Amino acid sequence: MEPAAASVQVMSETDLVFSIALTLVLMCFSAFFSGSETALTAASRARMHQLEKDGEKRARHVNWLFMNREKMVGAVLLGNTFVNIASSALVTSVLLSIFGDAGVAIATIITTAVVLIFCEVLPKTYAIARPDMVALRIGGAVRGCALVFFPIVATVGWLVALMLRQVGVKSQGLVEDREEAAHEELRGAIDLHHKEGSVRTIDRNMLGGILDLKELQVSDVMIHRKTITMIDGDLPPEVIIERVLSQPHTRLPVYRGDSDNIIGILHAKDLLRALSRANGNVRAVNVTALIAKPWFIPDTTTLTEQLRAFLQRRTHFALVIDEYGALQGLITLEDILEEIVGEIRDEHDVPVSGMRPQPDGSINVDGWVSIRELNRAMNWSLPDEEATTIAGLVIHEAQAIPEVGQVFSFHGLKFEILRKQRNQITAIRIAPIGEARIGQVSGD
């Protein structure tokens, strides 16, 4: 044992002081890299982008790191790994010179405690509490490290990609689609702030509606053909005029023979101008000459595409057809805007919306009411992937066409079939489970 103990070289006082000082410096660098990683991960990209637009020079470095995330992460990991290993080696050498072989165990304990508290937990806790401020302060230094360490980081990245390819994993496949990831990040942030109470429900619905436009098709929000008011073009002019003026809508589809045979769109303003020119003589009005050419669009058109088309054509009324050319419904610019701002009503709108709250806490809903409209009105989260209307959702969940009086329970709600016309559900009563008694469950 004595020869082994004698083999340990004792440091001079100068070397000991130097080693301790260098260790402290390395520990500071370790804390810097640990805090930088946390701050740059938690910092708000949107706020940094705005700060750079406002002339904040430090935000430019942070945004560069965001755009070159691989370089940033590689530089931080390389720097942190190097200083931690170097500091551990120095501490071990110092304690070996003092305590001999027992210095290895002592160095392990001391290094673990110091690195954990002062180089990991403390800087990361501070950085997560003030991510934007810390990111602005360290952005320039981390960018410099990223540029200096780039050759090493690039080599390591190449080796990692090579090893991943050997097991059949492509590194490009690990990167998410940026556009989709950005939409999900925005949606998650909106929902989180709404849950915390900093975003009102109406604002959440508006912001979420904008993000949903590219995912929804016109068939999801159109007015179904069963509820469209149409005019028979073969009727006498006085009857057509009377019916047009009695409707709350300014544009009405006109058909001949069969309701699928739409020949055009009649605008109430054009009809009034013609009446004015004819000095009120309804028989002198040529209704056929006032009919505008209809605009047909496929039911698979997304709301984003349709909104763009409305703006380009400077019109906001279109008829929706399926792949066989059959009329499915109509959509207006107002229908798309309502997906963002909610229901838009004026003095001519019919106040009935198809939803009637009941004294017992339940709500009677017409079958044609859309799931999205019901979710917004009641702050529910019924799924709308497989069905557009509430009647369609019940049929989808029941996997059958239910009978009047049947009650189904799903998604935390009870659905009682109130009325039915042939195979079409026309009225449903809905109540939260446990809050309203609406009958006995006869189906699940």
Image (cartoon, helix red, strand yellow):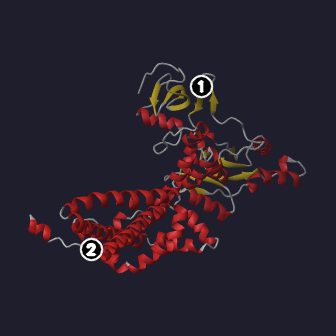
Relative image position of residue 115 (x, y in whole percent): 35, 61
Tag 1's secondary structure? loop
Task: Name which residue type carries label 2.
Answer: Leu
Q: Quadrant of the C terminus?
A: top left
Q: Which residue is mark 2?
A: 159
Relative image position of residue 23 (x, y in whole percent): 35, 70
Quarter of the image where one finds residue 398: top left
Q: Which residue is mark 1?
A: 361
Quarter of the image where one finds residue 304: bottom right
The answer for how far apart the CA atoms under marks 2 and 1 are is 64 Å
Q: Name the residue located 13 percent from the left edge and 70 percent from the top edge.
A: 6
Does residue 119 appear in this view? yes
Does residue 402 appear in this view? no
Instruction: Pick whichever, 352 or 238, lies toward us.
Output: 352
Quarter of the image where one finds residue 230: top right
| Total labels drawn | 2
Disc 2 versus disc 1: nearer the observer: 2
Q: Is residue 7 above or below residue 185?
A: below
Task: Name which residue type carries label 1.
Answer: Gly
Q: Quadrant of the N terminus?
A: bottom left
Q: Name the residue located 63 percent from the left edge and 54 percent from the top edge.
A: 318
Instruction: Pick whichever, 132 or 404, lies toward us.
Output: 132
Relative image position of residue 253 (x, y in whole percent): 67, 49
Q: Name the residue located 49 percent from the left edge and 53 percent from the top edge.
A: 323
